[in-house]
Amino acid sequence: MNSNTFLENLKDVPFIFEAELSLYTTYRVGGVTEVLALPETEEQVKHLISFTKQHKVPFRVLGLGSNILVSDLGLRGITCCLRNFRDIKIDDNSVTATAGTALDEVVRETINAGLAGLENLSGIPGSVGGAVFMNAGAFKTETFDKLKSFKVLTDKGEIKKFRKEDVKYEYRKVWGIENCVILSATWVLDKQDKEILKARREEILQSRTAKQPLEYPSAGSVFKRPVGAYASKLIDDCGLRGLSVGGAQVSTKHAGFIINYQNATAQDIYDLIKKVQKIVKEKTGFKLEPEQIFWGEFK
Ligand SMILES: Cc1cc2nc3c(=O)[nH]c(=O)nc-3n(C[C@H](O)[C@H](O)[C@H](O)COP(=O)(O)OP(=O)(O)OC[C@H]3O[C@@H](n4cnc5c(N)ncnc54)[C@H](O)[C@@H]3O)c2cc1C
């Protein structure tokens, strides 16, 4: 498909032709996407879905790119980044936010409104859509804990609302929504003194700064917590802190993170992930499963 076809068909949807995905992902690596669409409304997302279906164009949804490793070879088709589809509405003790809203902004706004339940998610650098998609969590709290419902656009272009009890979810996994675009989410929270909530947020943000290598590009914890162990402890016990491939390194500050230490390529990061998995398996028997998502081709 050439640029004119996109220009003709996507004229109402803001988009960039041949956009560098390293600018839209927190690892700061990855090649070029043929088209980066940046819809601002539900109608624009709908239009994109019907266009891609009609023309059989590959389609991917990107939130804030904080859990994705994009191949250096780039991506065909449309990457639909929702970062400009942002809105938060608070009504009494319920909050609804559109998918591209930063989760941390929702946390801040609810704390300011004296609403408790999301404060432990402070500092997660993803979007509302990304958080719902994989039930992001921290400090013994998950996105789904206080979630009431969420709205999606199905791959058939239909709007559907899921109540929490309609879906199966677990640690970092939600079933049955793989082909949906999450449009918004609603949480029902508890009223609480906002000064207490602000103090809790501060404590969490300080703990993140102290323990995580936030001074380097990364996509957070690389691996899921295996049953009966902690990924970062296993990696540490195998002596892998500081292990590197090209410009990618197992963080010396938090062994569960791989950082873009010095101009890493996506392939460096991918190779390091594989190397860590292999060594941990050989030395401990644990099979580490990536929490992060790989897009495109890797060798
Ligand atoms: C420094 C750092 C710390 C982190 N700490 C944590 C943590 O404590 N806990 C935690 O759980 N995670 C953590 N993460 C990982 C990440 O922030 C979360 O996984 C977050 O939920 C990803 O959201 P995103 O918008 O960036 O998703 P993206 O990375 O953009 O996408 C991730 C996946 O979600 C899908 N997706 C995104 N938006 C939508 C949508 N609207 N509809 C359908 N699918 C969608 C994408 O297609 C992709 O498959 C951390 C990351 C970093 C860099």
Image: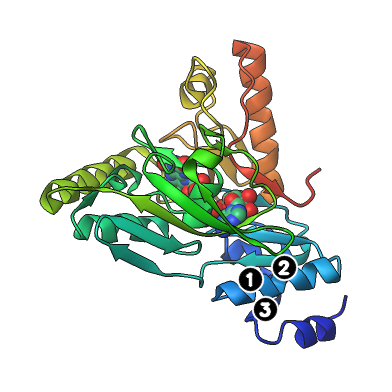
Label 1 secondary element: helix
Residue 90 % position (x, y): 30, 63
Q: Is residue 31 left or right of residue 244?
A: right
Residue 224 % position (x, y): 54, 30
Residue designated by label 3 = 16
Amino acid type, mark 1: Val
Dot 1: within a 10 Å radius of its alpha carbon, few (fewer than 14), some, or many (20 or more) residues? many
Dot 2: within a 10 Å radius of its alpha carbon, few (fewer than 14), some, or many (20 or more) residues? many
What residue appears at the point 76 percent right and 86 percent down from the top-left corner?
A: 7
Residue 218: in sight, yes or no? no
Residue designated by label 2 = 49
Looking at the image, residue 145 lies above or below residue 34: above
Dot 3: within a 10 Å radius of its alpha carbon, few (fewer than 14), some, or many (20 or more) residues? some
Looking at the image, residue 19 lies above or below residue 184: below
Looking at the image, residue 240 lies above or below residue 156: above
Q: Quadrant of the C terminus?
A: top right
Cα distance between the residues tagged 3 and 2:
17 Å
Q: Which one is in front in this view, the residue at disc 3 or the one at disc 2?
A: 2
The answer to whether the residues at label 1 and label 2 have Cβ atoms under 8 Å apart is yes
Q: Which label's residue is closer to the chain start, 3 or 1?
A: 3
Cα distance between the residues tagged 1 and 2:
6 Å
Cα distance between the residues tagged 3 and 1:
15 Å
Residue designated by label 1 = 45
